[in-house]
Amino acid sequence: MKSRFFTGAAVVAVAALALTGCTASADESDSAGGALKIDVPDLPTHEKIGDFEDSLDIVAWSGFVEPAWSDDFTKETGCTVNRRVAGTSDEMVQLMRTGDYDLVTASGDASLRLIAGGDVAPLNLDLVPNFGDDIVEGMKGQIYDTINGKSYGVPIGRGANILQYNSEVVTEEPTSWSVAWEPDSPYAGQIIAYDAPIYIADAAVYLMAHEPDLGIKNPYALDKEQLAAAIDLLKQQNKIVSEYWADPAAQITSFAGGNTVVGTSWEILRKLTEDEKFKSVLPEEGSTGWSDAWMLSAESDSPNCAYAWMDYTSAPEVNGQIAMGFGMAPANAAFCDLNDEAKAHCDYFNATDEEYFKKVWFWTTPIEQCIDGRTDVQCTNFQEWTDAWLTVKG
Amino acid sequence: MKRRTQLAGLLALPMFWLVGIYIFSLIMLLATAFWTTDPFTSKVKPGFTLRNFEQLIVNPAYLSTAVRTLLIALAVTALCMLISVPLGIFMAKIAKPWLRGLLAVAITLPLWAGYLVKILAMRVTFTDEGFFNWALGPFGITGPSFSVTTVILTLTYLWLPYMAIPVYTAIRQLPANLFDASADLGAGAWRTIRTIVLPLIKPAIIAGSIFTFSLSLGDYIAAKFVGGSTQMIGSIIASNINLNPPVAAAFAVVPIAFVVVYLLSVQRTGALERM
């Protein structure tokens, strides 16, 4: 699964993800130094940029490290870039634990695990001058890359998990996710769902709006009862899905082949169908989403090259190239003002539309500590989510 | 002494392969099944617990998935047999040489294409607007869409050569005079097949079935691409392999157990000795 986080864009409005001091709201008991403290290994930060090493090894999502921009970097710094493409967050975590890599493009459900496992080091943002005022508000200091006031990640981009539909069959634009969850959906049997434990959060987002009695405040902070309710909803949905997708190509062919008319998707996948009849909407309940960031291995043997790379790729042009290549909203808003093409890209992916991303809960690793601030219960961790997820399909 | 050196030289590579790589990695995997995982960082810690095996029985989803996978593997094996025997008889005894050659190529042709390519081809065939519904729609037949049935058909398509080739070879080796003698004694075609052909090619069928059965047990890519919401043992192992390797290792024992039981029951029939 490509794991992605709930990012901070939502924090402003939702004020639930108070893991970082700057986002704590009045609801939280402690608004000063971060309402939540998470035990993480104390690792040293790189002090200053020294001589560049020979090479830089990066674990990346497909499309994040491409010769189109890495060649220029090598020319400038002399650091040869070696890329290892990973298909899932879990794979990334495993690869980073080998200690053979310097950098990773970590998504939300990977980053907390990496930080807590002592696999990635805190960052000295002074050494990344391009990480500045132009980084979009919603991606600063979020729970997935800032723990106990220390920054661990340099944001790359973000996106939402949207509701895509075939407008020839679904003639009226759906305003609610109910078409994908309720057994009396007119599209039963033609619904596609995401195939990963983190999809439980999508059920939780739906329950937040429709079952307020459950008291879910953050879809990544579910106690046992709330998790059971989400699983029940997923089991109910299991009876009306046409299939589950984890592979983007499978999702696209499912829509194009007519097996599916409505279901969860990414903007880039809708675009790739190259068919105007497929439309997308961010329903009223909001949705889950993902946000990726560069993270530096605690055992990196090329920290200088790594810092140079994080700075280089945070420049508006390069950050924009990555965002356009992958199909997501760039982290650096300065890119949007570069030219018309960049502007169009930013508009299409709602890059600077914080109102849009306020409704998006970015993927975050569920942990036992409730990240919505509750202290009277223990929340379910990702392992429990995985076990529960496997019971959905039976 | 020289003889011994020769023997050692002959066995060195296969023994290294079998013990050093094959058995050692399997034992390492099985040992992991007794280890534990840190729930937060999902790091594996050596230890001893039977909790992972307990999960297999306690978790109803794991149990039903194991049973479903077993039934799928048996169905694929049965389907492969049903196709291979008549095909083998036709190719070996009835078809003209040119047709026999053509059929031999047709059977082995799927082996030339990549595994993923074949599964995606089946995916395209069985989509709602795919070839199957287009071809049979006019007769009022709609395809199985993405379901367990499609998984069985796809796995049959993938593994058929492993059954068809040994069966065909075995039938081809049956002397023609057996058929003549059977006909002379008044047996019809069906009786000849039942009493002469089938008993003689049983070892070949069993050899083929070991492939189709064990390959089906281990597959999960087919379920992922053409199974809709079908979940197989491999799907659960794949979901756990990075996050909770001990549970994945424990579940990996299940198909091994199925295959061992299968081989033991086959051995009781005495077919293995004649293979």
Image (cartoon, rainbow, N blue to C red):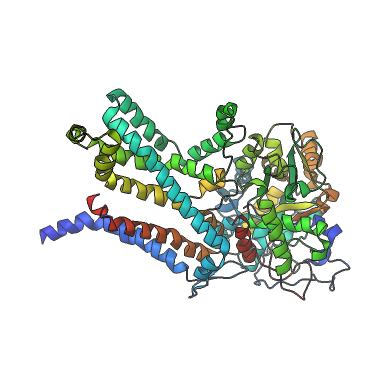
Evaluate whether residue A151 shows in this view: no
* Residue at x 50%, y 38% (from the top left corner): B117
Outermost residue toward the right in this view: A26
List x then y, in percent, for residue B155.
46, 43
Evaluate whether residue B157 shows in this view: yes
Q: Which of A74 and A164 is in front in this view?
A: A164
* Residue at x 75%, y 49% (from the top left corner): A331
* Residue at x 84%, y 73% (from the top left corner): A30
Quarter of the rendering containing residue B160: top left
Q: Which of B146 and B144 is in front in this view?
A: B144
Quarter of the rendering containing residue A16: bottom right
Q: Nearer the viewer, residue B250 or A304?
A: B250
List x then y, in percent, for residue B96.
28, 24
Outermost residue toward the front in this view: B186
Is residue B196 depicted above or below B274 in this figure? above
* Residue at x 27%, y 32% (from the top left corner): B92
List x then y, in percent, for residue A163.
75, 45
Is residue B215 depicted above or below A343 in this figure? below
Residue B68 left/right relative to A36 = left
The number of discs equals: 0
- The quadrant of the rendering that contains the N terminus of chain B is bottom left
Residue B206 left/right relative to B143 = left
Residue B155 left/right relative to A308 = left
Quarter of the rendering containing residue A150: bottom right
List x then y, in percent, for residue A28.
84, 70
